[in-house]
Amino acid sequence: MSPADPDNPNEAARLTQQLIDHGYTKRQVARILGRDASLVSQFFTKGKGKAFVGALRQVVRAVRGGERDTEALSGIAEANTKRRTTKTGQKARVRGKDVVGKPGESMAGRAGKQAIRSGASHLAPVVHETGRAGGRLAFTVRMKADQYTMSAGSTEDSPGLRRGFVPRADGTEERTYGSASTGGFDAAEWSQRVADHHGDVTEAMKAWLVETGRAVEDADIQYLEVRAWVPPQQQ
């Protein structure tokens, strides 16, 4: 690919520059996008980044609205990143593991539709190990918009989070509960919740959503992500 024209940057570079103007570095933008910093640099030098324009637009919109938490911005970016396709038109596999991180420090895991049907059991160790370490948790949940009972983005639904939700073209919404900036949830308490549901993280989350008045009784979780960390003073 030929070098980009510095006097006429592409959309990815222009949006990234807006984030830089708001105080983020290229490395932080890369982390929000879940990519390497060298790729973000190529938005400016080689004109790359077309696949990330939608995600960057939503991230810029969130930052303008006051969101500063990089975990929340990462969730927005992931929900709006266009997946690569294979030659046959199928979605390409995403590089990376469903569970990443180190117990006792920070971990993250996600479950799509197939894993959700089996209870997202691979997320249980993330919850339990973080609970034993005295850590905290944050969650991202995706469901049909009409299965949530609280207004999208309300402070009652996601206290302390300015962003709180991401609408999607398929009629679903991703909502974030907890973050490092708000302190998150007690992992030990959630470890007990998951144990009470025999290791079924999906059911534990659904029960919590219903119990707290956030979802209808027959809610159907389509995607679930858990982020775990141990506060520095407890490591």
Image (cartoon, rainbow, N blue to C red):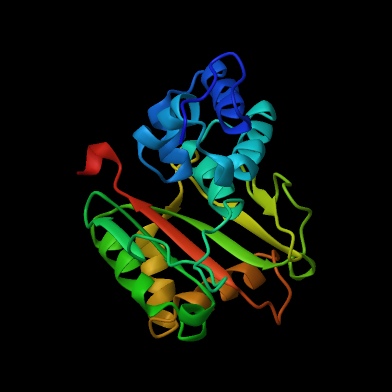
Q: In this view, does 184 lie above or below 62?
A: below
Q: Whole-percent x and y of residue 198?
A: 39, 85
Q: Whole-percent x and y of residue 45?
A: 44, 25
Q: Is residue 142 above or below residue 186?
A: below
Residue 221: which quarter of the image?
bottom right
Q: Can residue 168 be seen in this view?
A: yes
Task: Depth check: give the residue in front, 211 or 9.
Answer: 9
Which residue is at 69% across, 33% downward? 61
Q: Whole-percent x and y of residue 105?
A: 24, 49
Q: Can residue 161 be seen in this view?
A: no
Horizontally, residue 114 falls left or right of residue 41, namely: right
Which residue is at 52% across, 49% downward? 178
Q: Whole-percent x and y of residue 144?
A: 73, 69
Horizontally, residue 113 falls left or right of residue 213, namely: left
**Total label count?**
0
Task: Depth check: give the residue in front, 39 or 100.
Answer: 39
Task: Depth check: give the residue in front, 217 or 36.
Answer: 36
Which residue is at 56% across, 47% downward? 51
Horizontally, residue 167 falls left or right of residue 190, namely: right
Q: Which corner quadrant holds the C terminus?
A: top left
Horizontally, residue 10 falls left or right of residue 127, namely: right
Q: In this view, does 42 lie above or below 134?
A: above
Which residue is at 54% across, 74% downward? 88
